[in-house]
Image (cartoon, rainbow, N blue to C red):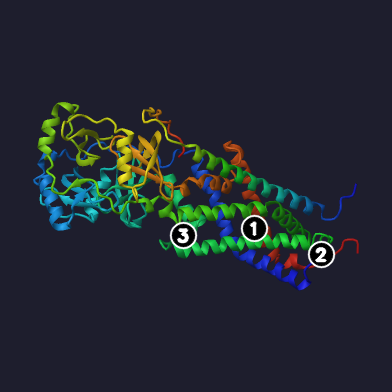
Amino acid sequence: MKLPPRFGDHAAFAIGIFFALLLLVFFGWKLADNLSRDRALGPVPASTPTPPPPSRGKI
Amino acid sequence: MSGVLTQAKVARWHRWLGLALSIPLLGWVISSMVLVLITFDLPNGLQGVFQLRPYNSVAVDLRGASLTPDRMLEFLARDQGLERIHWLRLEARGSHLWYTARATPFSPVMTFDAKSGQRLDPLSDELLSIVANEALQGSHLKQLVPVAEFNRDYAADRVPAVAATLVGEQASTLILSRDNGRTLRRMDASAERFHWWYKTFHVNQYSDDVILWTILLYACAAGIIVVALCGYLLYWWRRRRPPPTGVQNASTLSARNLHRKLGLLTGGVLVIQILAGIYLWLSLGPLNPSFRGKPSFATDWHAGIPIRQPLADPAAILTRLGSSLPPSEHPVQAIEWRRLGERDVWLLSLRKDQRPLVFDAATTARIEVLTPEAAGEIARQETAGHPAYDYLGPLHFQSMDMNRRLPAYRFRFKDAAQTDVYVRQDTGEVIMRRPAFWRRFGPFFATHQLALTRVKPLDLGLLALFQIAFLVLIVTGWRLQFPGRKASQPRRDPTS
C-alpha cells in the first residue's frame, strides 16, 4: 500500500502534539495533587511523636 | 493560507533565529545531561556527606575569656546601641577565644576578641584560615577567594563571604561568612561540578547581576519558543505540498527530513520544558528571596535577651553544670546564652559536630526538646505580622550547620504567603521557611525533567531520548544552514 505524501511528517506532528498534551496533563495532575496534599496538611496534636530520621537519601 | 512572502519571512526567521539560539540551546541540553549524571547517585544530594572536625585544634578553656558576658553586653549597649540580642556565644577557634553576638535572628553576627574586646568582623583571611582548617576532618585550607553569597538566614541580599578550597581527605569548597566564619554552604567535588555546569551553561549566569542575565536567559528561551512555533507554522502551511526532492543532494535531503520530523515530534515538549524552566528560574533567580521566605522575617522582632540582663559567666556555668556534663578530655567547645520564650538557657557544645546540650539557666535542668507550643511561639516572634499558626507535626530536617538531619517541628503560618516554618526541637532555631510559592516547585520541576513515572531509569531514559533528539535537531539545523560546497550542488538525476 502506498502511503500518502508527507505521511511521516503528519505522523510525527500527531505524536508530537500527543506528547505535548500528555506532558500538560501530567503537569496539571501533579499540580492538583500538590495543592490537595498541601491543603490536607492540617493541625496535629502536639503529642505526635517524632518519626525516626530517614536514611540518607537524595534531598 | 498565508501569502508566499509571509511564509518566506517565517522560514527565514526560523532558520536564522534557530541558528543563533542553537548555541544556548546546545548548552542547556548538554548541561542537563551532565547535571543528571552528576546527581544520579549522590548519597546525600548536593549537600554531600562530610565529617566535621569535632574539636578545636587547640584545647582552649572557655574560662580563659577575660571579658565576662555581662561586659560584652555593656559593649553592645554602648557601642552598638542595642537593647536586646538574639544570642551571645563564646567559642574557641584555634588559640583564639571569641564572643559572637547576633542582634536579631536576621542580622549579621558581630565577633569580638574575648580577651581584648576588639571587634574582629569582618573576619580577616588569617582568622578565616583558622576556621577553614578546623572545619573538616583530615582536610586543610589551600586558598581563600572572596565571594558574596545568598543565604536564607540573613536579611541582607548578599552575605560577605569567602570560598575556602580545602584539600586532603575531604577535598571540598566551603563558603564561610565573613561575620563569624559560619559555614553557609559545603560543596564536594560533585556539588562544585554541578554548580559550575548549572551556572555556566544551564541558567547562563556569568556574574552576580541576576536581572541582566535573567533578561538574556529569558530572551533566549522566548526566542526558542518562537523558533519552535515558526517550525510548526511552516509545517502547517506546507502540509499538502509534496516533499522537496531533486534540488538537494541525498545527505542534505535526509538532514532536512530528520530535522522536520524530529522538530514536529519534540517541539511541543521542548516548549513546555522551557516554560517550566522559566518558572523554576524565577524561583531560584530573581525571586529567590521570596522563594526562601525572606519577606516573612519579622523586622519588628522584639524577643531575645534584654541587654541589661545579667548573664552567668563561663566559670559559673561550668561549675554549676559540672555533674550534668559527660566526662571528656576535651574542653567545652562553646557556650551560648539564649532566651527561649520566657526561659533563659545555656547551650553547651561538647563537640562541634553534635547538637549542643541545652540547660535551663534558672534551674540547670537539661532541656531535651521544646514543646511544639514553645517552639511555635518562638517562630511566631520571628515571623512578620506575628500571625496565628497551625502545628503540622514533627519531622527530621537537614541542618546546614550540623550537616545532619535533626528533629524539628513544622508550623504553617496564616500570613499572606502561607509560610511553613521549620524550627529545631532542641534550640528553637528557625532552620527553614517555605512559603506556598516554594511548595509549588515540585510539579514544575518534574515537568521540566520529564519525570513522569517516578521510576528513575524510565524517567531518565525518556529525558535522554528527548535530549538526544534536541541534539540531532541542532546538528541537522546547522547542516541545513551550512550544507558545504559539495552538498550545495544540485543533485544529478541518475536516470538522466
- Residue linked to disc 2: B491
Q: Is the C-beta separation of discs 1 and 3 under 8 Å?
A: no
**Disc 2 chain ID:** B
Residue occupying the point 61% across, 52% down: B272
Q: Find residue B2 and report its horizontal and vertical position in percent.
A: 77, 69
Task: State whether discs 1 and 3 lie on one chain.
Answer: yes
- Residue linked to disc 3: B205
Q: Residues within 10 Å of mark 3 (few under 14, many from 20)?
A: many
Residue B474, numbered circle? 1
Question: Looking at numbered disc 3 in the image, what kind of residue is underneath it?
Answer: Gln
Outermost residue to the bottom = B5
Count of numbered labels shown in the rendering? 3
The secondary structure type at the circle numbered 1 is helix
Task: State whether discs 2 and 3 lie on one chain.
Answer: yes
Residue occupying the point 38% across, 53% down: B295
Q: In this orientation, which residue lies closer to the viewer: B267 or B131?
A: B267
Question: Looking at numbered disc 1 in the image, what kind of residue is underneath it?
Answer: Ile
Q: Quadrant of the N terminus of chain B?
A: bottom right
Residue occupying the point 37% across, 54% down: B150
Q: Quadrant of residue B316?
A: top left
The secondary structure type at the circle numbered 2 is loop
Task: Specify which label sits upstream in the sequence, 2 or 3.
Answer: 3
Give me the C-alpha separation between circle 1 and circle 3.
Answer: 23 Å
Residue B125 sits above or below residue B171 on the image: below
Q: Nearer the viewer, mark 2 or mark 3?
A: 3
